[in-house]
Image (spheres, rainbow, N blue to C red):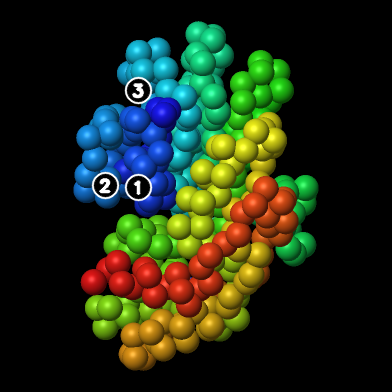
Amino acid sequence: MATALVTGGAGFIGSNLIEELVKITDKVMVVDDLSMGLESNLPVSDKIIFYEKSITDYSFMKRLLLDERPDYVYLLAAVASVADSIDRPLETHEINQNANLFILDTIRVNKLPVKKILFSSSAAVYGDDPTLPKVETTMVRPLTPYAIDKFATERFVIDYGNLYGLNTVCVRFFNVYGPRQNPKSPYSGVLSLISNAIINDKQFTLFGDGSQTRDFVFVGDVVQALLLLMKTPSASHDVYNVATGTASSLADIIQVFEKLTHKKIALKLQPPRSGDIKDSLADISKLSKLGYQPQFDVEHGVAVYLESLK
Ligand code: UD1
């Protein structure tokens, strides 16, 4: 069996990934500064070694990579919010780009025998281009520090593959939701905010009329995609959308929540949020050709998410 390093492993997506990784690897090293994640998100397993460190601690990262020589590296650590990146562009750049570049370069310079490196990018790179669905070849229009760093780092990750022979792959996540998405953060995704409101009988602020659409993907399907891309040799030096290929409007989603909880959500109506895109939808045929099949429609995924919050 193999070993894996997961940066950002105590976060929402990372901890869901690690739940599966502990079943198929000997050792999982987790680096997380707990700025967003929680150590308690991690499953209990002797295979997990947790380091409460930032990926910007370069001397630590270098020592870890050289000492541990992981087989697989999942680069999930990030300033994960667009709004946060707008407040802190320089720190975002340091974390989302420079620290990842340092990891790549440490692997290159020291000729470490890493089998594959996966970098988590975002649908944010497509920006406000209205073309739907988004295909990986759709023009990118990164409009925020978050999106700019994600796109530039994608390019570094892919070109470290092309130029130096590292085996690398990138993913563009769409609107991910599910267990351990922190509903308390103001930066959280809309589904966790709706869950929080309905469970605690609070108002939910709806920006716009609810007709905006998103490709909401359950975190279990995201984990399926990450594991598939890591083990598929042809998925190399390339980028893949991770989504479901189906759009739901917020109005549809609110109905799903109301049906599942037998409650009515108290809505506070606000004008559309500035900078929001109206509609988002992924073309997932590239990933589907590798065997990816999302298992959760929103009704199923929201039910599992609500159950996890009990
Ligand atoms: C999401 C990502 C963002 C990424 C983008 C790529 C999150 C938190 N954000 O943004 O990082 O760049 O996809 O396409 O996952 N809404 C409300 N009330 C609220 C919060 C949101 O009505 O309290 C609405 C928003 O106005 C928007 C929709 O819900 O129309 C989705 O919002 P959000 O979950 O923040 O995600 P995106 O804006 O799609």
**At 55% from the left edge and 37% from the top edge, which residue is drawn?**
230
The spot of residue 130 in percent (x, y) is 74, 63
User: Which residue is identified by label 3?
Assistant: 57
Secondary structure under badge 3? loop
Q: The N terminus is located in which quarter? A: top left
**Is disc 2 surrounded by few (<14), some (14 to 19) or many (20+) residues within 10 Å?**
some
Q: Who comes first in sequence, dot 1 or dot 2?
A: 1
Q: x and y percent of residue 214 in the render?
A: 59, 68
**Residue under numbered circle 2:** 43
Left/right of residue 73 with respect to residue 181 in the rendered view: right
Image point (54%, 10%), residue name: 111
Query: To which residue does mark 1 refer?
Result: 19
Local crowd size for mark 3, using a 10 Å CA cut-off: few (<14), some (14–19), many (≥20) = few
SS category of the residue bearing label 2? loop
| Residue 270 seen in render | no
Residue 20 lies, in percent from the top left, at: 39, 46
Which image quadrant for residue 66?
top left
Disc 2 residue type (three-letter): Pro
Determine the secondary structure under disc 1.
Answer: helix
Distance between the alpha carbons at the discs numbered 3 and 2: 25 Å
Task: Name the residue type under label 1.
Answer: Glu
Residue at 35% x, 22% y: name it. Answer: 57
Side (left or right) of 221 relative to 36: right
Residue 52 sits above or below residue 104 on the image? below
State the separation of the CA atoms marked 1 and 3: 26 Å
**Residue 240 x/y as whole percent:** 65, 46
Q: Quadrant of residue 127?
A: bottom right
Identity of the amino acid at label 3?
Asp
